[in-house]
Image (cartoon, helix red, strand yellow):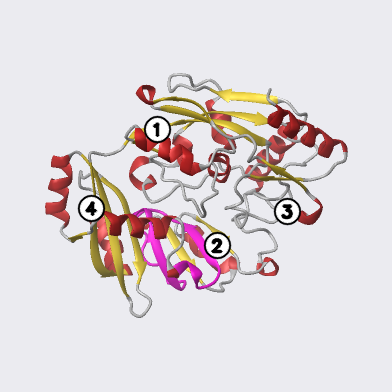
Amino acid sequence: MDYALSRLCEQVMTARANLQAIEIVGGGTKRFYGNPLPDQDKATRLDLSAISGIVTYEPSELVMTALAGTPLSEIESALAEQGQMLAFDPPRFGSTSTIGGVVASGLSGPLSFGYGPLRHYVLGAHLLDAQGRILKFGGEVMKNVAGYDVSRLLTGSLGMFGVIVQVSLKVLPLPMRDVTLMFELTEGQALAHCAGFRSKAMPIKAAAWMPDTESQVGHLAIRVCGAESAVEHAKQILGGQELAVDAAGQWWQSLRDQTAAFFNAGPVWRIAVRGQTPALDLGVTAFDLAGELRWVTGELDAQAVRDVAVAAGGHATLFRATEVGNLPADGVFQPLAPAARSIVQRLKKEFDPKSIFNPGRLVAGI
């Protein structure tokens, strides 16, 4: 065990002995996401930036293992040199984003519509627990599935079970062709257009719509990736205007990393719904994942938003709040059903019996 990791273990054991909460921080780009820690100013801040670097990378095996503090930019650069990528398209939210923060947040980007979400790509993880031990789950090759479910459990856990110190991820080759087609449509027209292509065999990997600021018409972007012949065939069927490579990259980045003007209009709600759900009529809206993910901005009543989400077969999260004082009393995430909450409580007690790791960050009160 190197010095940096040993130092983290010592900090954890000290905090546990003093019953002091620990805030786990990588690049700090996702601190806005989730519930704030109670008495955050009194918590021990565990900085993972010192444990950084790619441990192993086998391009022929499509597997990379990296320490949690490794910058996402470093990982993507290494993959690009080998013509590979993180297919779940992780949001950055800033240049200091780390791979540990990516896995802990569990967030995926627009390409996850066609390639699948982050949890499908996590092969293994090392966890620093409340006793200062390093627990190893899963493997570092795709054939090894031992403990894979625990690795998935850690994905999106926001550090509530311990400190993710190392992760192994499946990577994929870059597509031979990557084309973005743009359409000027209203939200309803864009949703209908997405419903229309779902039954067709086309290599559509992303589809998202953002409104214009001064009209009800917006822009639907459809991203087609794959072999040259398949992409050309899809272009003929879909139509639309093909964007230049740079323009397309900027458009998808502005959605994925929420740098578009749409996301600056106030609180932002993230609402997951069933496919082919019509417009929710909650306010100013954009959508991703061909309509399965709705972004809604504005000061909205939490219970009203949640009721609409449940009716649409999904759930709602207050993704970005303008002020801590405006957070729902029961947390920014949709409250768990009693049975599910009981399971989470038991898991938390098993991994973190003193409840020192990011208390309440994922589930209010746990």
Q: Would you name the residue on which mark 4 appears?
A: 197
The disc label shown at residue 171, or none = 1
Say what secondary structure mark 4 lies in: helix
Label 3 – label 4 distance at C-alpha: 43 Å
Residue at 15% over, 52% down: 235
Label 1 – label 3 distance at C-alpha: 33 Å
Tell me which numbered mark, 3 or 4, is placed earlier along the sequence: 3
The quadrant of the picture occupied by the N terminus is top right
Q: Would you name the residue on which mark 3 appears?
A: 37
Label 1 – label 4 distance at C-alpha: 27 Å
Tell me which numbered mark, 3 or 2, is placed earlier along the sequence: 3
Counting from the top left corner in percent of width and height, residue 47 is at 68, 43
Residue at 82% over, 52% down: 42
Say what secondary structure mark 3 lies in: loop
Query: Which marked residue is nearer to the observer: mark 2 or mark 4?
Result: 4
The front one of 178 and 120 is: 178
Q: Tag 1: Cα neighbours inside 10 Å, few (<14), some, or many (≥20)?
A: many
| Tag 4: amino acid | Phe
Residue 315 shown in magenta: no
The stretch in magenta equals 262-290
